[in-house]
Amino acid sequence: MHIAEGFLPPAHAVAWGVASAPFVVHGVRSLTREVREHPESTLLLGASGAFTFVLSALKLPSVTGSCSHPTGTGLGAILFRPPIMAVLGTITLLFQALLLAHGGLTTLGANVFSMAIAGPWAGYAVYALLRRSNAPLMVAVFSGAFVADLSTYCVTSVQLALAFPDPGSGFLGALGKFGSIFAVTQIPLAVSEGLLTVLVMRLLVQSSKGELTRLGVLLAKKQPRTETEAVTR
C-alpha cells in the first residue's frame, strides 16, 4: 500500500476498479448531501482529507511493488462514516498518484478498495461496536484507527497474493509471505496511527464539541427538567 503503477496485471487492475466504483459513487452522494445539509462541516471534512493525505504520504519501503505507511482513514470514517471516507480516500490517492508518483492510475482501483473502502469500514465497525458496548470514546477511537490501518494491509496482501500466487503453495503461501513482510512495519505504524488519532480527537473535542455532537461522536447532554416540568409530571 500503495501498490505501484503498472504492478498489477491488467485484469486485476480493472476488476478492483469495478469493485470500488459503487462504493465511491455512493460516497459522492453521501458527501454531497452532507455538504448541502450541513455546510458548516466543510472545514472538518477538509481537515479529515488533509489528515489522510499527509499520513498516507509518509511511506516506508516494504513488499516489492508496494510500501508501508499510516493511512489516516480511521479519523474520517469515525467522524463522517465510511461512505464519505471512500470519496476522501479516493481524492487523496488520485492526488498522490498524480503529484507524488505514489501509487498509480492503473492501480487506483485496488488502492481505493484497500485504503479508502475496506480500511474505513473495518475500523468504523470496531469503533461502533465498542461505543455500543459503552467503551470510553478514546479507546474506541484508538481501536478504530488501529484496525482501519491494519486491515488495509491485510486487503493489500490479499490483492498481491491473488495477482502473484506462490509457485509452490499458491495463494495461501503468497498471502502468508506478503502478510508477514507487511507486519514487520505495519503493526508499529498502526499503533502509532491509533495514538495520533486519539490526540487529534482530543483536540477536536475541545475545539469542535458542537460539531462532534451533531455527528454522533459525542453524546448530547440531557437538559435538566425545570421546576414547572417536574410539577406537571
Image (spheres, rainbow, N blue to C red):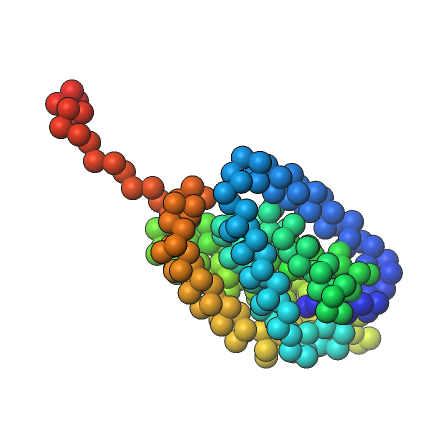
For the N terminus, give its image quadrant: bottom right
Residue 54 shows in the view: yes
* Closer to us: 224 or 63: 224
The image quadrant of residue 169 is: bottom right
Kindly identify the residue that appears in the image at 55 percent across and 62 percent down.
51
Q: Residue at 60% across / 51% down in the picture?
A: 85
Residue 219 quadrant: top left
Q: Does residue 149 appear to the left or right of 194 in the view shown?
A: right
Q: Nearer the viewer, residue 228 or 110?
A: 228
Name which residue lies at 55% across and 46% down.
42
Looking at the picture, how far across and down is residue 144, in whole percent? 49, 58
> Where residue 195 sits in the image (x, y, percent)?
44, 68
In the displayed structure image, the side of residue 59 where residue 137 appears, left or right: left
Please identify the residue farthest to the top as the structure is shown. 232
Using the rendered image of the protein, determine whether residue 162 is visible from the camera's viewpoint: no
Q: Nearer the viewer, residue 48 or 159?
A: 48
Q: Which x, y percent locates residue 12?
A: 82, 59
Residue in the foreground of this view, choosing between 191 and 174:
191
Report the residue at 76% width, 63% height from top: 98
Q: In this picture, is 231 found above or below 21? A: above
Q: The C terminus lies in which quarter of the figure?
A: top left
Q: Is residue 108 left or right of residue 229?
A: right
State the count of labels: 0
Residue 117 is situated, as x and y percent measured from the top left of the image, at 64, 53
